Amino acid sequence: MCGIYGFIGNGKVEDLINGLKKLEYRGYDSAGIAFSRNGSLIVEKKTGKVDTLCSAINDTLEEKINAGIAHTRWATHGMPNDINAHPQMDCEKKIAVVHNGIIENFAALREKLISEGHKFISQTDTEVIAHLIEKYFKGDLLEAVRLATLDLDGTYAIGVIHADVKDEIIFARRKSPLVITKNEYGSYCASDVTPLISLSRDVVFLEDSQIARLKKGAFEIFDLSGKQVEKRFCHIDWDEKSAEKGGYKHFMLKEIHEEPRVISDALMGRVKGEKIFLKEMEDWKDHIKNLRKINIIACGTSYHAGLIFKYFFESLRPFDVEVEVSSEFRYRNVLIDDRMLNVAISQSGETADTLESIRLVKSLGGRVLALSNVVGSTLTREADKTLYINAGPEISVASTKAYIGQMTVLYLLALYIDSVMGKEHPEKVKALSRLPELVDQFILTQEKTIKDVADRYVGYSNFMYIGRGMNYPSVLEGALKLKEISYTNAVGYQAGELKHGPIALLDEKFPVMAVAVDDDLKGKMLSNILETKARNAHVVAVTSASDHDVSSIVNDVIRVPDVENYLYPFFVGISFQLFAYNVANNRNLNIDMPRNLAKSVTVE
Ligand code: F6R
């Protein structure tokens, strides 16, 4: 996600740039800084790399400054360009704000501020924060930031500097991280410890709904009522490389741990009570009422997310949903008309086959809805509409958190389409809202068990993943994950297909990963598991927490919570991600950059 860095004390402009360079690994599309000079704020920002910004301000790098804030932006609201880059400012250009996160009610706040006379120049949600602080500022910057944060719904980590307030800078957070430290030269704040550990190894992690006032060499922390709270220092002994990964050994593991947050960010602003709001889709309501078919086009992991959509949507109503791998779709003689919705799913938004597929759809007069993680990517520019998954940059080549984010948005889309077609699903909407917490608990409690299971199976060279119904796509994804990062042969099948061929492979050297959760097809899965056991295969079952019958006949068990049937794919997906990760880690492989693979497949 975006990166924030700021300091107050003895420093130079170049220190802001160096802080940003240490946050580059987080992924970003533009960068900017703000500092004060003779009572005014100087703001410099550029689309592209920190080096581009650095070249543009080459002459000022050595300038001595006493405070500054800096930002690397990963676009969520508004295209990546110089205007939307942070810092964002107020009308008088006295206040500069950098922000990570998503302000859910920014449109309403913006409208209100405009009616009060404020002038906006960017498309960002962040700009409302600068104007709110301007509105509340009466000489006390901390108080103005506190009042502004009370108006914000959503998530934020913010850094604020004021031209007239020379001896302090303010930071505040809700859900997006900030870390603070100090030394004899100054006080410093950043999105993570990476830019801080060369300054001091004793840091304070700001907690949710806290505000920090940094002065030279000292800082205080307040809660949202304005009461000062105690600081709790932690000693960090990570080196810089492990600090980038938040202490995790690999980005893949870090990204799996981000999944609860990814789900809540994907839901943010789109679920209110028992209803789904997809404002991007509002003007397609008539089209949706008239739909006769949904076409999903995607590759790899995104294709598997698409398959889950098909099963979920069909569970809501009988409907024609086709899911096709882009590299096949683009060469087919497809029938496209205006009663179809074509959904192209691509984390990167740059996958060549998916782009060619949507060009084909558009050339035949079809409508394209993109689902992507990258604002401004080619797919989002060429599609008619885009739903962003807002997962933040995914650095590990193997997709994990983006897959979970795609599923979340696809569930929202399915429920939205069905409600436009006339059926509401209040229980399902509420269940989705509970998902981040359930997933968090699941990872916390089951990670070690899954690692232990993976440790026992690390010696095998072949795996067969089987599942049925909604969990069939999960076995395809589980097998793909194991293949790509551990270079182990893994195949995924509909369990009912076993006896039509694949069962011939099975013996004691060919373990089976079976999904047998407590759903309508559990009895069928039990029979399939018995068939594999009869061939001496070792079986690892992913089953529900309260299960007895599956767990009593298999060799190893991964338990997922007892949830509504349609939520199992989230937990099964994460189980298989952790299983693959631990097999690959056991073999000491280059997990984040598997051989022969690229993050963005921009060639056919
Ligand atoms: C697997 C993986 C790939 C991608 C596929 C499509 O972990 O990451 O299978 O899912 O290359 O990429 P996007 O979604 O960027 O189009």
Image (spheres, rainbow, N blue to C red):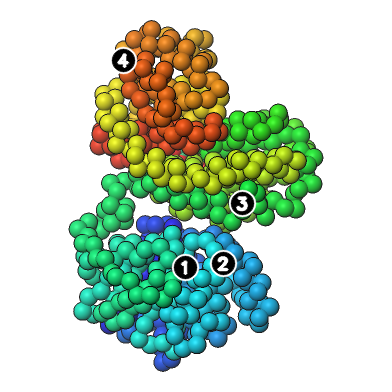
Q: Residue at x 47, y 76 (%)?
A: 145
The label nearer to you, 1 versus 3, is 3
Question: Which numbered disc covers residue 125?
Answer: 2
Identify the mark nearer the N-term, 2 or 4.
2
Instruction: Kindly check if marks 2 and 3 are in contact, taking CB atoms under 8 A apart as contact.
Output: no
Residue that carries the numbered disc 1 in the rendered image: 99
Alpha-carbon neighbours of circle 1 within 10 Å: few (<14), some, or many (≥20)? many
Identify the mark nearer the N-term, 1 or 2.
1
Quadrant of residue 409 within the rendered picture: top right
- Left-right relation of 466 to 193: right
Cα separation, mark 2 vs mark 3, equals: 23 Å
Residue 373 in the image, given as x and y percentages of width and height: 53, 50
Cα separation, mark 2 vs mark 4, equals: 55 Å
Q: Residue at x 41, y 92 (%)?
A: 38
Q: Residue at x 41, y 87 (%)?
A: 165
Q: Residue at x 44, y 34 (%)?
A: 561
Question: Which numbered disc covers residue 509?
Answer: 4
The amino acid on which the numbered mark 4 sits, given as a three-letter code, is Lys
Residue 217 in the image, given as x and y percentages of width and height: 26, 79
Residue 14 in the image, given as x and y percentages of width and height: 33, 76
Residue 187 in the image, given as x and y percentages of width and height: 29, 76
- Left-right relation of 45 to 457: right
Cα separation, mark 4 vs mark 3, equals: 50 Å
Residue that carries the numbered disc 3 in the rendered image: 273
